[in-house]
Image: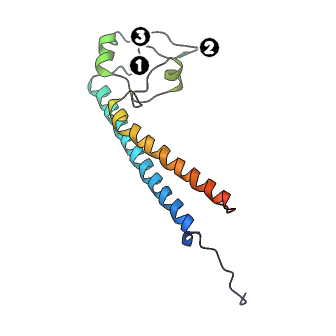
Amino acid sequence: MYGKKKKIPSRIAKEEDKVFLEYEKQLFELEIKRREIIEYITSQVDKNFINNNGCKDCRGRGWIIQQDVEISYPPCPNPNCTPDSRLKSGLAAKFTDHDRKNSVTNPCGPANPIYSIIVSPLDSLIREILSKIVKARNALKEKGKKY
């Protein structure tokens, strides 16, 4: 126990690791921004839906989920749920597999103007940083080093 101290390699001290740490820091910050913006978009979509009396039965879809033996999607039974009322309220923010199966566009996704203006460029930056990380790792592998 009192012999030679076992030297623990400090990965942070290595120049290559500093590069990775910087990329990871950038990636982490971008992902936080992306998450915050999507949360904002979701809250705005929900506010619009609620403020415009969106149909709680179908969540603005015009159909409901009916599950007996098989799943079916009959029209919304709410008499106040009309194409005009759905156009005014938009869709509720929660997006499900049933929406995907019925080709419903995610109201908080790329079709949303805020998403396309702010999140899409962030996604491009995230892909760019991930590409840099892969290139840096490949360069280390060529030098025979592990990361």
Tag of residue 57: 1
Q: Amino acid at mark 3?
A: Pro
Q: Which residue appears at 50% of the width and 56% of the height?
A: 24
Residue neighbourhood size for the residue with mark 2, other residues' Cα within 10 Å, grouped as few (<14), some (14–19), many (≥20): few
Q: Amino acid at mark 2?
A: Glu
Q: What is the secondary structure assignment of the residue under circle 3? A: loop
Q: What is the secondary structure assignment of the residue under circle 1? A: loop
Q: Is residue 106 above or below residue 121?
A: above
Question: Residue 10, position in %: x, y?
Answer: 59, 73
Question: Residue 99, position in %: x, y?
Answer: 49, 22
Q: Which residue appears at 63% of the width and 59% of the height?
A: 140
Q: Judge whether residue 92 can be spotted in this image.
A: yes
Write down the residue under mark 2: 70
Q: Which residue appears at 36% of the width and 42% of the height?
A: 37
Residue in front for this viewpoint, 66 or 107? 107
Residue neighbourhood size for the residue with mark 1, other residues' Cα within 10 Å, grouped as few (<14), some (14–19), many (≥20): some
Q: Which residue appears at 43% of the width and 27% of the height?
A: 106
Marks 2 & 1, CB-CB < 8 Å contact: no
Tag of residue 43: none
Question: Residue 53, position in %: x, y?
Answer: 29, 22
Q: Amino acid at mark 1?
A: Asp
Marks 3 & 1, CB-CB < 8 Å contact: yes
Q: Identify the image quadrant of the N terminus.
A: bottom right
Residue in front for this viewpoint, 37 or 145? 145
Residue neighbourhood size for the residue with mark 3, other residues' Cα within 10 Å, grouped as few (<14), some (14–19), many (≥20): few
Ranked by sequence position, the earlier of labels 3 and 1 is: 1
Ranked by sequence position, the earlier of labels 2 and 1 is: 1
Measure how far apart labels 3 and 2 are at the Cα level: 19 Å
Residue in front for this viewpoint, 142 or 133? 142
Q: How is the image coloured?
A: rainbow
Marks counted in the figure total: 3
Ranked by sequence position, the earlier of labels 3 and 2 is: 2
